[in-house]
Image (cartoon, coloured by chain):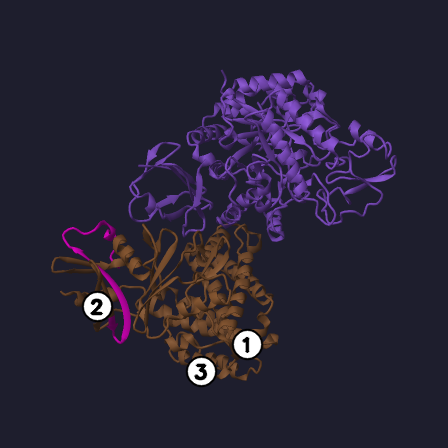
Amino acid sequence: MSLINVDDPHWYQRAVFYEVLVRGFYDGNGDGTGDLKGLTEKLDYIEWLGVDCLWLLPFYQSPLRDGGYDISDFFTVLPEYGDLGDAVHLVEEAHRRGIRIIADLVMNHTSESHPWFQESRQSRTNPKADWYVWDDTDHRWPEARIIFVDSEKSNWTWDATREQYYWHRFFSHQPDLNFDNEEVQRMMFDVIKFWLDIGLDGFRLDAVPYLYERDGTSGENLPESHEYLKRLRKEVDSQFSNKVLLAEANQWPADVVDYFGDGDECHMCFHFPLMPRMFMAIRREQRMPVTEILAQTPEIPAGCQWGIFLRNHDELTLEMVTDEERDYMYAEYAKDPRMRRNIGIGRRLATLVENDRRVAELLHAMLFSMPGSPVLYYGDEIAMGDNIYLGDRDGVRTPMQWSPDRNAGFSRADFAQLYLPPLMDPVHGYQAVNVEADMRDQSSLLHWMRRMLEVRKQHSLFGTGTFEVLPVDNPSVLAYARRQGDDVVLCVNNLSRFAQPAELPLQRFEGRAPIELLGRVPFPRIGELPYFITLGAYAFYWFQLVR
Amino acid sequence: MSLEDLLPGYLGRQRWFAGDEPSKVVVVEQDEVAEGLQWMVVDADGALYQLVVGTRPAHEPPHFVTGHTTGILGEDGGLLFYDAVLDPSLALALLAMVAPDAQATHVRPMGVEQTNSSLVYDDRLVLKLFRRLRPGPNPDVEVTRALGDAGFENVAVPSALWRSGDLDLAVVQPFLAGGAEGWALALTSLRDFYGGDSVDPASRGGDFAAEASRLGHMTADMHIALAQAFGAQPGDGRAWAAMAERQLARLEPEDADAAAARAFIDRLRQVADLGASIRVHGDFHLAQVVRTDTGWFVLDFEGEPARPLEERRAPSSPLKDVGGMLRSFHYASQVALMEQDEPRRPEMAPRADRWERRNREAFLSGYLRRPGIRDLLPRGQSSLTTVLAAFELDKAVYEVLYERDHRPDWLPIPRSAIGRLLGGSG
């Protein structure tokens, strides 16, 4: 019996997630595009790495004008990725290895080529006329901000067929569904049931703050949207068990917590502002950017969890920082204007940290030990780079680099047939950076990452323990204690590129002995005095405090 | 040797004691306030100091004294005498006495301080033991409470006070958990800057200007609240100048051009548009401010420890504090420069100047942009510049006098500032 069948409704609180772009992971049929079959072939790798749950970017039928977030049929797999049978096989094979799978689901909008929209635009009276948001003018809801400021001028676009404007919070080719329509509400339940029935373990719900529109509001975080999500959760709970709903709400923590409801809405939400603050703290060599945002993060209901990440398929999102911080981040991390996308920075982790292995490790050590379930982005475990000359956000969506062979070992297709060229620059290109080389090299980032995940798994406190920042005089040192019952792990991070001393106030743990978790090396017992340690440049320690 | 004989040597070793070993120390009051805890007020060459002394058998010295020399008074009659703040159990006894309602299980000393000794309990409470005692309300307690009442949120308002007669002895305040001292943050920024390859502080990741600007905001808010709590009168250039001149008289010829300094201060008398005179912080610098997760906090309203209490409570221009902080940016840039290897320093010196200038400007613009602060300041730009420069000079003179007694190595820092200010005046 596989692990996956163990009844554990809160598995996501202790899980490590791995975000996969099906298109970019592995090409199973040699047509130049990654597919479900290819992903299934690489499950052994995912298992070896120690990942608990895959998060698949959208794999539904789509014209792919927005990386698949423009869905044109919710019930069909994009033919380039395979078919429903491939999806079922992937889920079975993953479950057999104890790996769960969640998938992206876009509820807010569809592609304009979706038959629903094609029908809706035909007239004002057809059966789906009310499935989208139409109006005679483009003046309504001026309070709603434009999200893709680089490409869109308005949230309204004129449709010449119906001779009305339709509403879209994202690209103009992505009309918003009308959630005031009960048929739309029911249809979305059906979509979710369909995929849970074949075995998916949950969804990452894209763009949930925007489901409804109301006069005089920004159209974000409306009570109606929460109400719908609660009904959705109820439906899921009534028919399935051990599923997870992970909300993408790029909002301030105080607003995001509303998506947990009273533990009766989404199981998980992404913590967006933490990520840029982690980068900022490293650049400033002091902890305040991180501790400040954690101090502003409210408690979450029991059974809920944050999703935390360093990088993902989108740009490094800077919506949730102040203008001053945004200027700072641009100045620090996007020296070339092409690196900026919308309101963020389109870089991968390795390039953001200028290929500094120590910083990459430190950031991951923080990610794995801070409150929340870590979400890795494919390729970051081998320090893949990016190609800022590719359009939109494709720069961070290049093929996974498996080996130094042709096409990075990603595909046997002709080079020209690849959906995107693999990286070939001398520093981050697949000749230098690939899974095969990293597997052989025991000191590689990949092996380090695997070891960290292994250690993390030994202590459930990393998922569900309390979190407390310790007062340390040295501003470059960020120290915190994770605790669950009698298990205590102390994490100490040096954010500076210089060696630093720190006096840790550990008196309350007097008599316990710190044991460094990666090497199990015992450190001197904690006494009545502040505990003095030194940290090398960008060093970190995880100490279990043993009685 | 009796305990009394040990006192002069002990006092001479303390950072919080002004000057070298006193010639005469008289115990004014003494009481065993808890078992093994002697509380004393002593008169050292005419100044009152508070001591808390722990006693243990000398043949089994407690482990917490290991490595300490400063805090050990010595031995007498088979007993070891030591500063009780080193002893966790006595430190807890002290808290129980000062704030009987407070519960705590763990305690640690806060680190070296200039004028007081502070203990942190459970990372929640701070007990600040005043060392130099003066009759009348302790300015820190007085001001912190008034600011709290005025709705200023960036201070730790006392929750308990320990008094004896008209002497304030100790105060208990909330601990600013997770905070980092402005001084440490500034040095972090400077080390990043000196350790990099850019000559422009704005281009460095560790740039401090945004923090300096926020510090300016907080400083303005503090002054507005001080004016509200203690009132504001028209500025008195004569009084300000007279006070500065008393201090100038103590300079040595090698410190500064005395005539030029007097002329510089005298300009205060000629400015008609002085702004307001208010209760001020009095000793405002980067080590008196703490950046917490909710912003900058101010500590220690005791004023400059080497000045008489009356002078420290005397109203002054808010620009006195502004000048103090500007001096502190200079200090930080120079102290971090002194950390660098000697051969590197000439190359780094222009960076020190750029860092200082950038953060001065950021602090000042943050301060001046705060609504309401202009009402307390000279209206004209030239008056503002003159008054501010006079207070910067006054602070630099204070620093020279202080460093001569405490840190002669740092004397060149304020001296160079005086030279720069006087040179700039033509």
**Disc 3 from disc 1: Cα separation:** 16 Å
For the colour brown, the matching chain is B
Whether residue B27 appears in this view of the structure is yes
Which residue is disc 3 drawn over?
B242
Q: Which residue is mark 1?
A: B386
Q: Residues within 10 Å of mark 2 (few under 14, many from 20)?
A: some
Q: Chain of mark 2?
A: B
- Label 2 and label 3: CA atoms lie apart by 40 Å
**To which residue does mark 2 refer?**
B30
Q: Which residues are magenta?
A: B42-70
Q: Nearer the viewer, residue A518 or A416?
A: A518
- Residue closest to the eye, B349 or A168: A168
Q: Is residue A318 left or right of residue B147?
A: right
Q: Chain of mark 1?
A: B
Front-most of residues B214 and B419: B214
Q: Position of residue A364 (x, y in %)?
A: 50, 36
Task: Identify which amino acid the numbered label 3 is placed on.
Answer: Ala
Q: Is residue A1 left or right of residue B300?
A: right
Quadrant of the rendered structure where residue A389 is? top right
Identify the amino acid type marked 1. Answer: Thr
Q: Is residue B45 magenta?
A: yes
Q: Are marks 3 and 1 on the same chain?
A: yes
Q: Which chain is purple?
A: A
- Residue occupying the point 45% across, 54% down: B179
